[in-house]
Amino acid sequence: MDRSMSAEQRENITYLCDEFKKYNYISEEDYGRYEVMRGLRDKVGMGVRAGLTSICNVLGYDESITDRKVPMEGKLIYRGIDVEDIIENSKTEDRYIFEEITWLLLFGSLPTYGQLKLFNKVIAELRQLPSGFSEDMIMKSPSPNIMNKMAAAVLSLYGYDELAEEKSLENVLYQSISLIAVLPTIMVTAYQVKRHIYDKKSMYFHLPKSELSTAQNILRTNRSNKQFTEAEARLLDLCMVLQADHGGGNNSAFTTRVVTSTGSDTYSAISAAIGSLKGPLHGGANIKVIEMLDYMKEKIKDPSDDDEVFEYLCRLMNKQEGDKTGLIYGMGHAIYTKSDPRAVILRKNLSEIAEEKGFGDDFKLLYAVERLAPKVFELKKGGKDICANIDLYTGLVYRTMGIPEELYTPLFAISRLPGWCAHRVEEKMFGNRLIRPAYKYLGVDRKYIPIGERKL
């Protein structure tokens, strides 16, 4: 579709924008005057409690202290189990665990060996797209943005489901597992079509293998030679586990809950969540980190020189470097203060493979950002606790594997899908109320004027 505007159309749009600005304005002071919890955050920046969940907890402050906020090392809890314990124990058992964590989030407990074997079999059987879907819904309507194509494809699956509106627990769980299984196939197919149509490159389609994990199949189906190393697949599996959920208050999970609360279908709820995650302030942040990293590599001669990196970060915050926004991407979080456990775990597991793949200097730069950015914030903005978040390292994880930037955020969506589905099921079963926050009306009372009497 041609969206280029003629000179006349551009002039008309400019006029319409000017008209909009005449009657639409809300000042920063208005938010304070009416005590609005902007962004559903309280006065100290914490999220306003809007619901209850037993799926996931995110800790950045000591909750045992009620009279003040006491920062602590961050913790991520899946169904009562510290994610650090999950990672450490899985290492000794030498296996892929994304599917196991998917079971944990959906059903509430760790699966037995028999349950996990059954679950993996069900997922393997559901990885294929419906007959004709690739041709009709992806190849005939390609998109330069894979997130948009994924959202559209998920909505399109509604038409292939005879029980799309059936909202029994059994059916919603089946729909959820089906989406968890098939979304990687949608992502890879959409990317291959994008390569062919927009990048003018060859496309190739490989069928997923039933005996492989989700991480293994993603790497296998997206590479022309279908080859990958165990180290790559294990690191991708780890990255996906760390992104599988982040509490009911994260924007995309909350979006899932809001749509679910209306009584809408599974496909609508998950498509909406994908749209939420696409934004650069949410799932798209890892791409901004990689952009920042590339700017740094152009200007910093020695990644091991902390003084040089520190000076660059100061200029970055002063809007003199990078994209000139003054932001240090990958730093700061709404909840975590002293540390983001996901970033800590990922950093520890990334260093070796980054060195092996020739990205040792990239890793050094990002680690320097993690260490030095809090000092820059202290110098420029005062004593707020700030730490690296997971986005600081996920982009480099993908880069070491040769995964194109167009798939960074889609991989986040595939990883977060089990959490979204778990929150949809929980909201459906226990929410039982339409989510509808209030907004303060600031419009000025005016009289209706007949069209013949209106003046510019």
Image (spheres, rainbow, N blue to C red):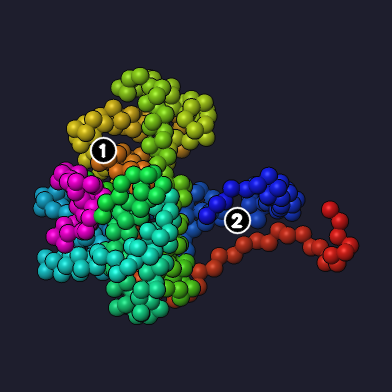
- What x and y, as percent, mark residue 140? 40, 60
Frontmost residue, 191 versus 47 = 191
Rendered image quadrant of residue 99: bottom left
Q: Is residue 339 above or below residue 167?
A: above
Disc number at residue 400?
A: 1
Q: Residue at x 25, y 64 (%)?
A: 127
Position of residue 94 measured from the top left corner of the image (x, y, whole percent)? 11, 51
The magenta stretch spans which residues? 206-233
Residue appearing at x 37%, y 58% in the figure? 139
Q: Position of residue 432 (x, y in %)?
A: 44, 76
- Residue 55 can be seen, yes or no: no
* Image position of 11 (left or right of 340): right
Percent from the top left, x then y, of residue 204?
27, 51
Q: Secondary structure at mark 1?
A: helix
Q: Amino acid type of disc 1?
A: Thr
The residue shown at (25%, 41%) is: 401
User: SS at mark 2?
Assistant: loop
Comparing 165 with 55, the one in front is 165
User: Taking 374 as reference, is 116 left or right?
Assistant: left
Question: Which residue is the site of mark 2?
Answer: 36
Q: Earlier in the sequence, mark 1 or mark 2?
A: 2
- Residue drawn 47% across and 30% down? 322
